[in-house]
């Protein structure tokens, strides 16, 4: 038999980041909530929470949190049908959906989909950001209930929907090109011209180089983990970078930016993958994601 008071305690601690804040939300004492977690961990024989500032979930703790998300959605559906079941003295709790996306989607189209859904829903959203090649891992580890990913193969236990293609251009200012590529954008020149890289997981620049020159090349790089700052840094002449069409269209049209090699975009297919257990109850979320993606990608 599942002890849902203990499961809810774990999920609330992870959401709030501390035992004390979770105790306030659940209207119990910190010692009571600590005792619930301790007894549940002893019963399961595994640690569910990494104590720290903030507290975080272990892998097993993440799976438990996703289970509580599903329970919360089911309860909300049930209470909507049978409101007499609602305990008026119990603290009101809204379900927070854990979702992962890549930074460039978040910076171009994803917020529109999330805000439209949020305005018409009682759910809260916790959006995590990772490289599009790695967000599927969040689903596989049970850390999120849905994700925007470049992985075409469905994650086990998930439904997959094609969203379209996020197109990137290798761009720089005309002055940068004139300085670093006086004899054209050659493989040798690329080896010496500084690029921009989002983080260690970012492979867009290297993928474009391989696609354009037919081989891998080493090149110097600055590190800058922000899509908007990526464009600003490119406009400043700091480096060349792979920027989404949506963020560079006007700059390319005005001539403030130019493509390093015209007509060589890099297309990254994107997919929406969502846990099957939640897919039907979150059909409206999926509809918004697909609708906005189709309009922007």
Image: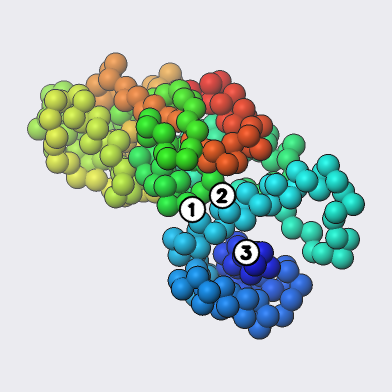
Task: Indicate left or right for 145 with 86 as reference.
Answer: left
Expressed as whole percent of the image width and height from the top left, the position of residue 56 reads 50, 66
Spatial CA span between label 1 and label 3: 21 Å
Q: Which quadrant of the view contains residue 181? A: top left
| Mark 2 vs 3: CB contact within 8 A | no
- Badge 2 or badge 3: first in the primary sequence: 3
Tag on residue 2? Answer: 3
Crowd band around label 2 with a 10 angstrom C-alpha radius: few (<14), some (14–19), many (20+): many
Q: Quadrant of the N terminus?
A: bottom right
Q: Nearer the viewer, residue 134 or 70?
A: 70
Task: Name the residue that disc number 1 marks.
Answer: 143
Tag on residue 260? Answer: none
From the image, state whether disc 1 or disc 3 is nearer to you. Answer: 3
| Residue 163 in the image: above or below residue 144 | above
Expressed as whole percent of the image width and height from the top left, the position of residue 132 reads 39, 39
Task: Name the residue that disc number 2 marks.
Answer: 98
Task: Indicate left or right for 23 with 190 as reference.
Answer: right
């Amino acid at each position: 038999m599942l002890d849902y008071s203990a499961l809810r305690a774990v999920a609330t601690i992870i959401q709030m980041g501390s035992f004390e804040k979770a105790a306030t939300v659940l209207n119990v004492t910190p010692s009571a909530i600590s005792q619930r977690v301790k007894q549940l961990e002893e019963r399961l024989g595994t640690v569910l929470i990494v104590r720290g500032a903030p507290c975080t979930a272990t892998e097993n703790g993440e799976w438990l949190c996703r289970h509580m998300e599903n329970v919360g959605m089911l309860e909300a559906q049930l209470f909507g049908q049978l409101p007499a079941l609602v305990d008026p003295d119990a603290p009101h709790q809204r379900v927070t959906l854990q979702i992962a996306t890549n930074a460039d989607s978040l910076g171009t189209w994803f917020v529109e989909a999330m805000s439209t859904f949020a305005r018409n829903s009682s759910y809260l959203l916790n959006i995590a950001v990772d490289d599009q090649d790695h967000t599927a891992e969040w689903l596989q580890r049970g850390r999120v209930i849905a994700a925007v990913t470049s992985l075409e193969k469905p994650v086990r236990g998930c439904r997959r929907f094609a969203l379209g293609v996020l197109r990137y251009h290798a761009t720089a200012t005309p002055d940068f090109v004139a300085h670093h590529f006086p004899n054209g954008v050659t493989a040798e020149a690329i080896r010496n011209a500084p690029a921009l890289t989002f983080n260690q997981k970012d492979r867009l620049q290297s993928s474009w180089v391989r696609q354009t020159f037919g081989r891998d090349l080493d090149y110097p790089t600055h590190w800058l983990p922000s899509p908007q700052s990526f464009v600003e840094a490119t406009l400043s002449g700091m480096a060349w970078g792979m920027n989404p069409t949506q963020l560079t269209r006007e700059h390319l049209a005005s001539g403030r930016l130019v493509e390093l090699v015209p007509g060589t975009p890099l297309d990254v297919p994107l997919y929406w993958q969502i846990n099957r257990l939640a897919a039907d109850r979150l059909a409206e979320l999926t509809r918004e994601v697909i609708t906005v993606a189709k309009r922007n990608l």
